[in-house]
Image: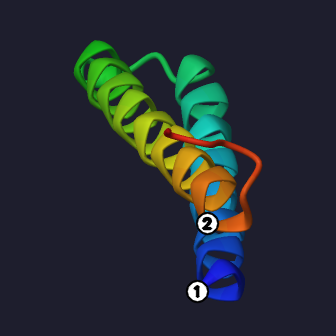
Amino acid sequence: MASALTVGLYIAIGILVIILGWGLVNLTRTDDGQRSRSNQLMRMRVIVQAVVIGILVLLGIVVGSIKLF
């Protein structure tokens, strides 16, 4: 279980880095849709960050670093 969560964590962090890169590239664009894309990328980034934090918490629980009771 811990290894599957670790792989999922690495995948989620990779997706997060890609979204951050797209956001930086989008900042250099000057077309009409730039603001809309920027907002959409920011929403995607926040969602992926929440997923990464959730996976980290689950991983901590599974490994035993976080004790619920």
Position of residue 47 measured from the top left corner of the image (x, y, whole percent)? 34, 37
Q: How far across and down, in percent of the image, does residue 6 sit?
A: 71, 73
Given residues 7 and 36, the one toward you in this image is: 7
Label at residue 64: none
- Mark 1 and mark 2 residues within 8 Å of each other at the beta carbon: yes
Pointer 1: what residue?
A: 1
Distance between the Cα atoms at labels 1 and 2? 8 Å
- Amino acid type at circle 1 is Met
Up the image or down, 43 lies above or below 32; here it is: below
User: Can you tell which quarter of the image residue 67 is in?
Assistant: top right
Colour theme: rainbow
- Label of residue 62 in the image: 2
10 left or right, relative to 5: right
Q: What amino acid does circle 2 point to?
A: Val
| Residue drawn where x is 30% and y is 13% of the image | 35
The reply, left or right, for residue 18 in relation to residue 58 is: right
